[in-house]
Every structure is written in C-alpha cells, then in structure tokens.
Image (tube, grey):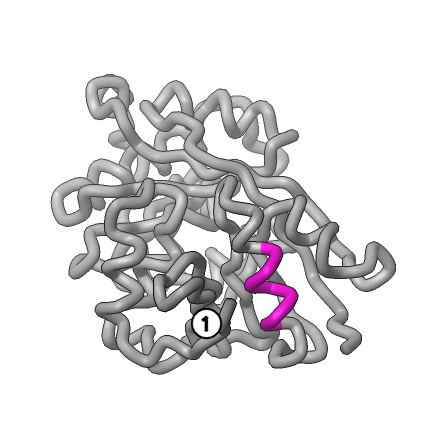
Amino acid sequence: MELRILHDSSTVYEFLKNKNRYDYIYQFSNLSSNQWENVICYGLFDEGELKEIAMLNINYDIPVLLAASFGNTEYSIELIKKLKQFLPPRFYTHIDRVTLEGVFSEDNVSELEEYMNMGLCNYELLNKIRSHEAVRIGYDNINSIKELIFASYPEAWLDDLVKLNENFGIYVDKKLVSFSSIHAYSEQYQVAAIAHVTTHPEYRKKGYAEKVVATLAKSLKEKIKFIGLNVKVDNIAAIRCYKKLGFKECGRFAACVVENSI
C-alpha cells in the first residue's frame, strides 16, 4: 500500500461523495477553496485505488487531524501507521478508537473523549419548536458571547467564533444567557456543523438551548442541505435536546490530543 499527498480537492470529493455527509461535514467543508489551502490531505492507495484519507488542518493553534473512518479500520490503521512519521509533534484528532489504540501509545494520548455525529433528518420536528426569543447576533456582540462562553463552556474552541452571520442568542434582562453558532460551513458542498451551543449555568433547564439551536437550524436550512453537529456521548441532556429537534445519531469517533513520538 502507498501513501500519497492529494493535491486535487476533486479527487477527495470523488472519494467522499457517496459517504454519509453528516459524518464528514468537516472534511467536505475543507474542500472549499477558502479552506483547502490550509489542509494537507493524505490518501492510502491499494493497487492504485484510493482506499482511505486523512486531513491535517494547519489553520489552528494546534493542528487538527481528521482521520475517523467510521468502520473502515483496516485501511485507517494502515494509513495512520504510514502517516505517523509526517505528523506534527502534537496535534488534535478525530479518529476511530480502534485506530488510535492500534497506532499510538496510551501514554501519548490526553483529553480523550468519545463523540457522536448527529444529522438533522426530521424537519417536521424542528418546525414544531417555537423559538421567537432567539435573535441573530454578530461581531458587535463578541464581548457578551465570550463572557458567556468563558462562564459556561470554557473548553470551547474559539478560533472561529462568530463565523459568517449564523449566530443566535437569547437575552434575559439584557444579559446573553444562551448561544449557538457554526464551525464548519460550505454552501458549495451543502454542509454546516452547529457548534458552541451553550447556556449559562444559572439559566439552564428552561429550553433556551433548544430554541437557539432550532432558530440556527431553520436559518441554515434555507441554504444548506446537510446540517449536523457532534456531541459527547455522555451528554445525555444535549442528545435528548437534539433528538427532539429532529437530529439522529450517524456515527461515533474519538477525539483527543496526541503527543507524537516517532
């Protein structure tokens, strides 16, 4: 088997196009022209046929390796074994648990969490949610957004906070108490990933998160066909909320930081 760098995004699209797009939202988003320049994409070939890919996004403080194959672990393990020597000394990754354990030492892995991908599949449920309290907000509200994030979701990635104009929040007595935004987004490939969903601890269990996510999803569906998100598998309350809105589970992956010792 042979490892190659894939310079042409159309080759990667041909490989991905028949896969479950909810599982590959970040990969499809990276194919967009404004993202592709930040990505190094590797492919594993067997007798000339592309069998698996992994994308390294270098546009963050810590590089991000998208390497989850959602079941195709034979080729995934072989790909990461061949790729390991070319990876940064430290990186964050989405990866299959079997591949992770088959390639990297447990001592080199930290911040390990299991996530599920969910995709919006039932718009009838979404449309039942009354969400008039949620309003569109933008960069003018960045201080209020950061204050909420730091209070309620300090582990959130803030690299692309307030992306485009797809951000919604709920205010109570002029205080931002609930928020949702997006991470990956591509109209070209019809994908968007909802992210940064949070509610201030003092205002939880009032349905605010449900309303901001519903309002965001309704806005996105005017432009995007595949709307997804990922959520920790032990976040039962959030999963229950998303299912109520019409999301369903698609795939699972491990997320962690790897200290890459060659």
Secondary structure character of the magenta stretch overall? helix
**Quadrant containing the C terminus in the rendered view:** bottom right
Extreme residue in the front direction = 47
The residue located at (35%, 62%) in the rendering is: 49
One can see residue 152 in this view? no
- Residue 208 is situated, as x and y percent measured from the top left of the image, at 43, 30
Q: Between residues 245 and 53, which one lies in front from this camera angle?
A: 53
The residue located at (30%, 50%) in the rendering is: 192
Q: Which residue is mark 1?
A: 42
State the extent of the magenta-drawn residues as a range.
Answer: 77-83
Question: In the picture shown, does residue 68 fall above or below 233?
Answer: below
Figure quadrant of residue 157? bottom right
Figure quadrant of residue 184? bottom left
Extreme residue in the left direction = 222
Question: In the picture shown, does residue 20 fall above or below 51?
Answer: above
Q: Between residues 155 and 59, which one lies in front from this camera angle?
A: 59
